Image: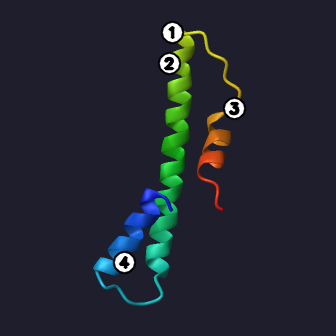
Amino acid sequence: MTSIEWLMKELYTEMNLSGDGRVLDEILEQAKEMHKRETIKFGYDFFASIEESEECIITKLPEELYKETFKKD
């Protein structure tokens, strides 16, 4: 469970929300997509900064690393 999924679950539980949760699910999916974009952008920014200052071999793109890190079981 990602931190975003945990937060949404806690909000739903603690706020005693009722209903089918479709709106909350839409918000969750939007938040997860935003997190994905931010994480991948961070990866590219990080790779750019170390390429300039250190010798580095990059074997995977940030998108690949993201998929490996956040894949569903």
Q: Residue furthest left?
A: 15
Residue 71 appears left or right of 44? right
Q: Which mark is residue 60?
A: 3
Task: Find residue 29 and report its horizontal and vertical position in percent.
Answer: 52, 65
- So how many labels did they put on this image? 4
Quarter occupied by the C terminus = bottom right
Query: Quick check: 66 above or below 29?
Result: above
CB contact under 8 Å: marks 2 and 3:
no
Task: Indicate the position of residue 27 as horizontal and vertical percent values.
Answer: 45, 68
Q: How many angstroms separate mark 2 from mark 1 (CA)? A: 7 Å
The residue under the point 63% across, 40% down is 65
Is disc 4 surrounded by few (<14), some (14 to 19) or many (20+) residues within 10 Å? Answer: some
Residue 54 in which image quadrant: top right
**Disc 3, disc 4: CB below 8 Å?**
no
> x, y (%) of residue 43?
54, 33
Distance between mark 3 and mark 4 Cα atoms: 37 Å
Q: Are marks 1 and 4 in contact (CB under 8 Å)?
A: no
Provide residue 45's location: percent of width, then percent of height: 51, 27
Disc 1/disc 4 C-alpha distance (Å): 45 Å
The residue wearing badge 1 is: 53
Badge 3 or badge 4: first in the primary sequence: 4
Instruction: Indicate which label's residue lies in the foreground, 2 or 3.
Output: 3
Q: Which mark is residue 49?
A: 2
Are the residues tagged 3 and 1 within 8 Å (C-beta)?
Answer: no
Quadrant in the picture for residue 59: top right
Q: Name the N-terminal-most of marks 3 and 1.
A: 1
Residue 17 shown left or right of residue 19 in the figure = left
